Amino acid sequence: MTDTSLYKKQHRAWVNANPVRVKRQEDGLTLNELATAMSVHPCTLRFWENGTSEPNNENLETVARYLEVSSEEVRQMWQDWIDARPRVIRQ
């Protein structure tokens, strides 16, 4: 397996472990359905789920309510997820 394909596999696993994505899929919601319920644009939610951007403080509160955790817990969950992002290894 090449470094690139290994990175892609690790990155996909990381994206699939996003706490919002995991809960959304467990709840059987589409991205559009959850975005509507959270009052955010579907692209915004997609960017959060794939790590392109992070929710601001106000939106983290919305995420916390959805995940049924405290604000501090969601911040820690989010930071743990970001910290686990795979890194490209350059030789």
Image (cartoon, rainbow, N blue to C red):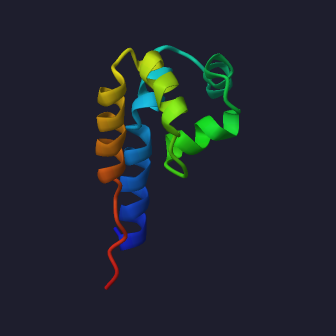
Q: Residue at x 51, y 23 (%)?
A: 62
The residue nearer to you, when weighing 25 against 82, is: 82
Picture quadrant where residue 37 is located: top right
Q: Residue at x 36, y 63 (%)?
A: 6
Residue 82, how many percent across, how many down? 36, 49
Q: Is 53 left or right of 3, judged from the image as shown?
A: right
Q: Residue at x 44, y 49 (%)?
A: 12
- Residue 78, relative to residue 89: is it above or below? above
- Residue 40, relative to residue 67: is it above or below? below
- Residue 1, relative to residue 85: is it above or below? below
Picture quadrant where residue 45 is located: top right
Q: Is residue 2 visible?
A: no
Q: Is 54 left or right of 68, judged from the image as shown?
A: right
Q: Is 52 left or right of 36, judged from the image as shown?
A: left
Picture quadrant where residue 16 is located: top left
Q: Is residue 24 visible?
A: yes
| Quadrant of the snapshot with the C terminus | bottom left
Residue 22, how many percent across, how many down? 42, 27
Q: Residue at x 35, y 35 (%)?
A: 75
All told, the count of numbered labels is 0
